[in-house]
Amino acid sequence: MKDIYVYPPQVYRRFSEDAKYQKTVRDVKKTLPYAKMIYATLIETYEYIMTMPTEEERQKHLSRMENELFNDYKPVLKKMSLSQGKLLIKLIDRECNQTSYDLVKAFLGPFRAGFWNIFAGMFGASLKSNWDPEGKDAATEQIIEMIEMGLL
């Protein structure tokens, strides 16, 4: 049986606070499916490469997967706003229980993980961002739970 959460209705005194809340809802609705898809792809890829007998075959498969993922998702990711990209990084940590940096490092190595983290840093993001559902991400966690229950 699923847990049921009850939250009071959101009431804001200022229009700007309501606009920020609505923007967060919109961003979560756009990025949460991608975070879940990344988690599913990660599990599937990990299970598949564990069946391969040699490291060379694993590296070839990872290289092929990387190219396919770039070709499939690059147009979608390019259309995301900066705040949606930052949120996606945090949602990946929420879904996978690992930071994006750790995932990239595990599959592509520390040098490339460092490169992508520096690249993200140029835009004010970090692949090492952690999900904090009890602290600064509590409002977003509440929005996610409401979306998953079908309330938003």
Image: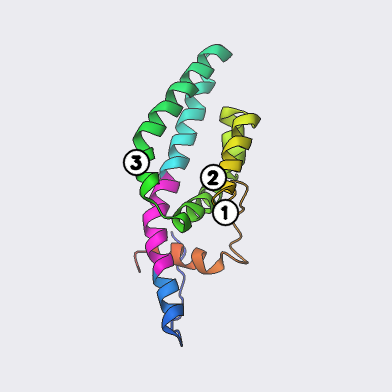
What kind of element bears circle 3?
Answer: helix
The magenta stretch is: 23-36
Q: Residue 69, located in which quarter of the rendered image?
A: top left
- Asked if residue 24 is among those painted magenta in the image, a careful observer would answer yes
Q: Residue 109, position in %: x, y? A: 62, 28
Q: Residue at x 44, y 39 (%)?
A: 40
Is 55 situated left or right of 8 in this image? right
Q: Badge 3 local density, few (<14 within 10 Å), some, or many (20+)?
A: few
Residue occupied by mark 2: 96
Q: Residue at x 52, y 69 (%)?
A: 139
Q: Is residue 2 above or below residue 6?
A: above
Give the Cα separation between the discs numbered 2 and 1: 22 Å
Give the mark nearest the N terminus, 3 or 2. 3
The mark found on residue 124 in the picture is 1
Give the mark nearest the N terminus, 2 or 1. 2
Amino acid type of the residue tagged 3 in the rendering: Pro
Q: Quadrant of the N terminus?
A: bottom left
